[in-house]
Image (cartoon, rainbow, N blue to C red):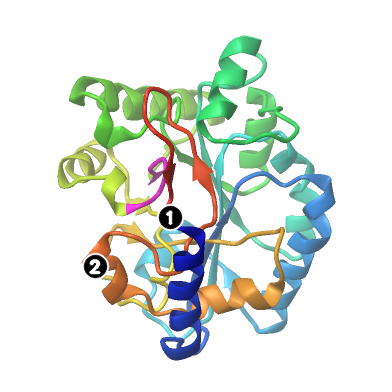
């Protein structure tokens, strides 16, 4: 979809289909480069000032109180998550880290790490976590979730491969942190990269929540008790613009087109597939 059209669609939704900031907000990040820590701290401080408390995935998905809840999460596998733990502790915020298990740097080859970051279209400081660092994140009280083994588009690979991608990753994470892993976030986030068959398998595998990356649905009523709709918080743009994305009611547009009315403004490159926008 052309960039100009994306901007027009987003502008229409922001101006005419915006709701008040929801009581429950689910956001996610990818990498946390040191240059973005100020923006990250500003994000946490803002929600803290409004009285939002953080929640685990299961608590967030099942809460029907009047409390303001913030679901903080991270996708993929970046060593700089570990460096940001003191900042989360400062605000007494709990986060969920959805981890790909392929690129742990203490067991993975340099070529495999390079190929992994190519799949997630990341060109920064390409350093993934080590297994001891992940264990420290878990021991600090944060939730560790599964994001598949190697970040493949699950609906585009054979059934036996996506089963392996999920099951092997879950098992490895449980071995590393020494506790059950019951939360899942699927790669690439949009609805077309997941299916009812995948959902059924995730339930069978023991997952209690499944997180999407579909923006524009923060105001939507939760239909599936397992599902958490998240909006990406972009650390390279303003607080005001990110908050506008959270207030967008993009339900009709997403249902009709299968795409986001917000637009995550990124292009992912899939191996053996043509480039596609996350729209």
In terms of depth relative to the viewer, which is nearer, 64 or 125? 125
Mark 1: give few (<14), some (14-19) or many (20+) Cα within 10 Å. Answer: many
- Horizontal side of residue 6 vs 87, given as left or right: left
**Residue placed under numbered mark 2 in the picture:** 255
Q: Quadrant of the N terminus?
A: bottom left
Which residue does the image show at 57% across and 79% down from the upper left? Answer: 244
**Residue placed under numbered mark 1 in the picture:** 213
Q: Is residue 267 above or below residue 112?
A: below
Which residue does the image show at 66% across and 40% down from the upper left? Answer: 137
- The local secondary structure at tag 2 comes to helix
Q: Is-magenta flag for residue 187?
A: yes
Residue extent of the magenta highlight: 184-190
Q: What number is the disc on residue 165?
A: none
Residue 177 in sight: yes
Residue 107 in sight: no
- Horizontal side of residue 149 vs 71, given as left or right: left
Mark 2: give few (<14), some (14-19) or many (20+) Cα within 10 Å. Answer: few
Q: Quadrant of residue 131?
A: top right
Q: Position of residue 164 (x, y in %)?
A: 30, 21
Q: Position of residue 182 (x, y in %)?
A: 38, 43
Disc nearer the start of the sequence (2/1): 1
């Amino acid at each position: 979809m052309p960039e100009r059209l994306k901007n027009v669609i987003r502008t229409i939704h922001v101006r005419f289909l915006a709701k008040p900031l929801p009581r429950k907000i689910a956001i996610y990040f990818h990498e946390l480069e040191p240059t973005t820590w100020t923006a990250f701290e500003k994000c946490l401080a803002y929600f803290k000032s409004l009285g939002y408390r953080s929640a685990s995935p299961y608590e967030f998905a099942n809460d029907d109180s009047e409390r303001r809840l913030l679901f903080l999460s991270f996708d993929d596998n970046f060593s700089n998550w570990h460096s940001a733990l003191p900042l989360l502790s400062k605000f007494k915020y709990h986060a969920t880290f959805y981890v790909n298990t392929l690129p742990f740097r203490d067991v993975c080859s340099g070529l495999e790490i390079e190929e992994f970051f190519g799949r997630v279209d990341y060109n920064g400081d390409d350093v993934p976590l080590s297994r001891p660092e992940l264990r420290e994140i878990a021991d600090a009280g944060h939730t560790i979730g599964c994001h598949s083994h190697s970040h493949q588009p699950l609906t585009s690979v054979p059934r036996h491969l996506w089963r392996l991608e999920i099951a092997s990753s879950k098992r490895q994470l449980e071995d590393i942190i020494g506790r059950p892993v019951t939360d899942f976030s699927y790669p690439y986030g949009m609805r077309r990269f997941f299916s009812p068959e995948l959902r059924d398998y995730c339930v069978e595998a023991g997952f209690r929540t499944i997180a999407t990356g579909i923006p524009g649905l923060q105001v939507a009523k939760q239909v599936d008790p397992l599902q958490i709709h998240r909006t990406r918080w972009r650390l390279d743009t303003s607080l005001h613009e990110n908050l506008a994305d959270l207030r967008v009611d993009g339900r009709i547009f997403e249902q009709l087109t299968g795409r986001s009315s917000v637009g995550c403004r990124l292009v992912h490159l899939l191996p053996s597939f043509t480039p596609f926008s996350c729209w």
